[in-house]
Amino acid sequence: DTAVSQTPKYLVTQMGNDKSIKCEQNLGHDTMYWYKQDSKKFLKIMFSYNNKELIINETVPNRFSPKSPDKAHLNLHINSLELGDSAVYFCASSQFSNTEAFFGQGTRLTVV
Amino acid sequence: AQSVTQLGSHVSVSEGALVLLRCNYSSSVPPYLFWYVQYPNQGLQLLLKYTTGATLVKGINGFEAEFKKSETSFHLTKPSAHMSDAAEYFCAVSRTGANNLFFGTGTRLTVIP
């Protein structure tokens, strides 16, 4: 059983399109995250979300928006995709914010 | 402010040799410290973590790390490298836990047969 799963694993799309990446966790965790890993392997948090609070990294463009239909899902919507959005996006979850995060396998987004 | 520095973006060791991956951090408060491993085309897997208590932390796959406050370091070691250890290793620091992780830029470990 995959603890944190993301779909799709690969996503190739044209500039200007709108796309979504889905994330589901079956760990019963209460907090979920999105991280971006750039071409130099640098990982940076984009959002953290639980049922009470959404925390947004101030460097994230507002074209990116997380949406959580329920506690086990946190999807990432991206509008008007740009070349610079090409990266690997990781979903993660944790039980409370003060424990370790469990990561999904990543979604490699390529904008052409 | 928090930051993590991983010395050496690429480390090569012979199979059976000691693995030492360096991590130094800066944090204004006592930190939570983590090591994650990323195998090719896979997600990050937690190797070990330090929160409080014993400063020598043992993780999975024979890895361990020691929190040294005076040196602001959290180096990762393994006595004997195995071919399957070849991967990218990330050190991370947080003030509170998973919701505030700052990652280093990673160290790619190559194991030479």
Image (cartoon, rainbow, N blue to C red):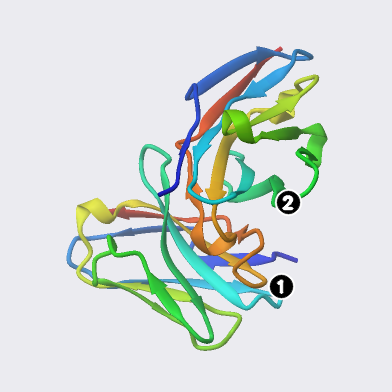
Compared across the picture, whether B50 is left or right of B5 comes to right
Marks 2 and 1 on same chain: no
| Residue holding disc 1 | A27
Residue A39 sits above or below residue B52 on the image: above
Q: Quadrant of the N terminus of chain A?
A: bottom right
The label shown at residue B52 is 2
Image coordinates for residue A6, horizontal then vertical, percent? 54, 66
Compare residues B54 and A73 and report the one nearer the observer. Answer: B54
The chain identifier of the residue carrying mark 2 reads: B
Task: Please rate how many residues cluster around mark 2, counting C-alpha atoms within 10 Å: few if below 14, some from 14 to 19, many from 20.
Answer: few
Res. B92 visible in picture: yes
Q: Secondary structure at mark 1?
A: loop
**Which residue is pictured at 56% across the width and 39% down the height?**
B90
State the separation of the CA atoms marked 2 and 1.
Answer: 24 Å
> Mark 2 is on which residue type?
Thr
Compared across the picture, whether A51 is left or right of A79 comes to right
Image coordinates for residue B8, horizontal then vertical, percent? 49, 21
Q: Quadrant of residue A10?
A: bottom left
The label shown at residue A8 is none
Compare residues A102 and B5 and report the one nearer the observer. Answer: B5
Image coordinates for residue B107, horizontal then vertical, percent? 53, 29
**Which residue is pictured at 66% across the width and 62% down the height?**
A99
